[in-house]
């Protein structure tokens, strides 16, 4: 018999992950849904079917009858606040899974707090954009006690994701550390694309010509982000796919780790400066590819390319 699972947090990533868990996870009980803005949970429940989901009003309601609790929240403070509430309950024998992007020290602290209360903990951040979450194409990174990771893995590959990176037996913070370091690759990729397109435009090569090169040599994420930049998606989207506040949080974690470990990360510092400029220009609508606008502006062009 499948365990009763509760899902906490239905942002852009969480919605897609929860949807695939219901549709492909072989659950025999309704997925319990909680979100601070209840309408998001209600909307997802309507989409998936009332017989396959159960919307609750509080974190306590979500946790009390669940054997596995999965969180996907925006930042360290939100996760810590939620875990404070979770640990007000008897969690003996429960498994708490966190799919948020956290500082590794936060994940290690959560593992200690939760296991001391008799529960298990797995840190399971994911790589991929919201569209990949919807399609079940994420890469899941699982760390924690091997027995706990084994309980999570059936819901990773071919359910919420296309692959799993298994850090069984390693500290929970190791998966968060990989997520933070991995996200610097994405940010630096966006920075390189932004600089390349601005150089192509100002030298007369043209952004379309550069995009053809990118599609031929770097298909996948490079081509996808390049396409979004040239289409003006980086400033026209009402709901960002990778909100600027999250990008600033993740880059801040990376810079703190670099400073703590005496690492030289000049590319990351340049990209971080451009994220800060995006926040000034698009306070609530900034997205990670909006770095393109900041590089354009710094080079004497308009932030908006159209």
Image (cartoon, rainbow, N blue to C red):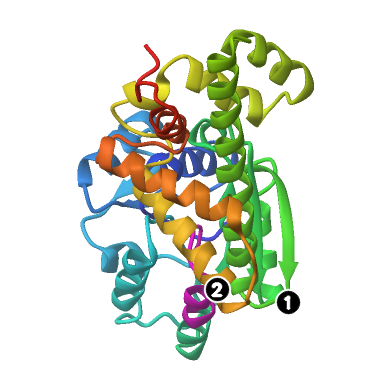
Closer-to-camera residue (33/182): 182
Real-space Cα separation, disc 2 to disc 1, in angstroms: 27 Å
Residue 15 position (above or below residue 123): above
Left or right, 33 with respect to 42, comes to right
Image coords of residue 75 (percent x, y): 38, 60
Image coords of residue 71 (percent x, y): 43, 59
Residue located 40% across and 29% down the image? 293
Image coords of residue 153 (percent x, y): 68, 57
Closer-to-camera residue (16/276): 276
Q: Circle 1 is placed at which residue position?
A: 169
Q: How many marks?
A: 2
Q: Specify whether residue 108 is painted magenta.
A: yes
Crowdedness near tag 2: few (<14), some (14–19) or many (≥20) residues, C-alpha within 10 Å: few
Boundaries of the magenta span: 96-110
Residue 48 position (above or below residue 72): above
Residue located 72% across and 74% down the image? 146
Residue located 48% across and 65% down the image? 253
Of callouts 2 and 1, the N-terminal one: 1
Q: Circle 2 is placed at which residue position?
A: 259
Residue located 74% across and 26% down the image? 218
């Amino acid at each position: 018999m499948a365990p009763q699972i509760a899902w906490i947090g239905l942002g852009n990533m969480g919605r897609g992950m929860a949807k695939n868990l219901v549709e492909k996870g072989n659950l025999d009980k309704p997925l319990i849904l909680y979100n601070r803005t209840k309408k998001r949970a209600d909307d997802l429940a309507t989409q998936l079917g009332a017989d396959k989901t159960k919307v609750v009003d509080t974190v306590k309601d979500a946790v009390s009858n669940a054997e596995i609790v999965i969180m996907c929240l925006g930042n360290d403070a939100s996760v810590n606040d939620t875990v404070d509430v979770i640990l007000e309950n008897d969690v003996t024998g429960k498994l708490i899974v966190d799919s948020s992007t956290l500082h590794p020290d936060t994940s290690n602290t959560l593992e200690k707090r939760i296991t001391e209360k008799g529960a298990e903990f797995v840190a399971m951040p994911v790589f991929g954009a919201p569209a990949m979450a919807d399609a079940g194409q994420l890469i899941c990174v699982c760390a924690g006690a091997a027995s706990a990771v084994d309980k999570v893995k059936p819901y990773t590959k071919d359910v919420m994701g296309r692959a799993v990176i298994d850090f069984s037996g390693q500290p929970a913070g190791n998966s968060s550390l990989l997520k933070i370091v991995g996200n610097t690759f994405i940010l630096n990729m966006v920075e390189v694309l932004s600089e390349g397109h601005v150089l192509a435009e100002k030298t007369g090569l043209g952004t379309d010509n550069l995009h053809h090169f990118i599609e031929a040599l770097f298909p996948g994420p490079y081509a996808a982000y390049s396409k979004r930049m040239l289409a003006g998606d980086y400033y026209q989207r009402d709901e960002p796919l990778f909100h600027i506040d999250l990008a600033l949080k993740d880059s801040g974690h990376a810079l703190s780790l670099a400073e703590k470990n005496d690492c030289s990360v000049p590319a990351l510092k340049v990209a971080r400066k451009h994220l800060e400029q995006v926040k000034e220009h698009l306070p609530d609508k900034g997205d990670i590819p909006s770095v393109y606008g900041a590089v354009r502006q710094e080079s004497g062009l308009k932030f908006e390319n159209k």
